[in-house]
Image (spheres, rainbow, N blue to C red):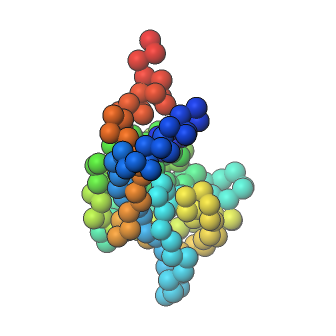
Amino acid sequence: LGFLTEVRLENLYPSLERVFANDFVLDERLMLRTHIHRRGETIAPGVVLNDVVISKGTVAHMIELKIAIQGRFVTNMRGDGLIVSSPTGSTAYSLSAGGPIIDPAVQSLILTPICPHTLTHRPLIVPSNAEIEVTLTSKDDGSMATLDGQMGVAISRGDTVVIATSEHRTKLIRFPESNYYDVLREKLKWGDG
């Protein structure tokens, strides 16, 4: 859907002129940091804008995940996986999986189950200062942790994917007359009646 795209192609050159004239606003977006604990080692550190996805492999069966927040057990979940996203990522894979849309100004993390076996496993919104730990408790069979859809790391039974807010922020250019809800309305075709 291109929620980060502020400028239409036909307005590219006038928009660039506005940028060169400093006629814009910078929006800061929360980012996530992640790493994996594997048998006492920390591997695959990364920083992402949208999401970290823990998912099953190519074989059509569920995986089992143990989820903890701030070191406290929350639930065991069976399903195709879990998406942990930033507010910016709430309009990406998380939205397609039934997650909520979060205004980027709301500093939070979103946990969205992917095809959970139990219908009571619903998306969960937690404060941005929460640290989330997702441990693969089932046989791995090709399970992956994917960072922003760009880098995949194979995970095995007992591996814990840790996700928290990064100290880094992404800065996006926005024009003063535009706002997040205008973009939502346009991209989701709200109000087209």
Q: Position of residue 162 (x, y in %)?
A: 44, 70
Q: Position of residue 111 (x, y in %)?
A: 41, 53
Q: How many marks?
A: 0
Residue appearing at x 50%, y 45% in the figure: 16
Asked if residue 157 lies left or right of residue 171, the reply is right
Residue appearing at x 62%, y 60% in the figure: 150
Say above or below: 23 vs 152.
above
The residue lying toward the viewer, choosing from 183 and 143, is: 183
Name the outermost residue toward the bottom.
40
Say above or below: 151 vs 188.
below
Question: Is residue 3 visible in the rendered structure shown here?
Answer: no
Asked if residue 66 lies left or right of residue 138, the reply is left
Q: Quadrant of residue 57?
A: bottom right
Name the outermost residue toward the top.
193
Q: Position of residue 141 (x, y in %)?
A: 69, 65
Q: Quadrant of the N terminus?
A: top right
Q: Position of residue 101 (x, y in %)?
A: 39, 40
Say above or below: 73 vs 124.
below
Residue appearing at x 29%, y 48% in the figure: 105
The residue lying toward the viewer, choosing from 2 and 121, is: 2
Residue appearing at x 43%, y 22% in the figure: 190
Asked if residue 32 lies left or right of residue 106, the reply is right
Q: Quadrant of the C terminus?
A: top left
Asked if residue 76 lies left or right of residue 152, the reply is left
Question: Is residue 39 visible in the rendered structure shown here?
Answer: yes
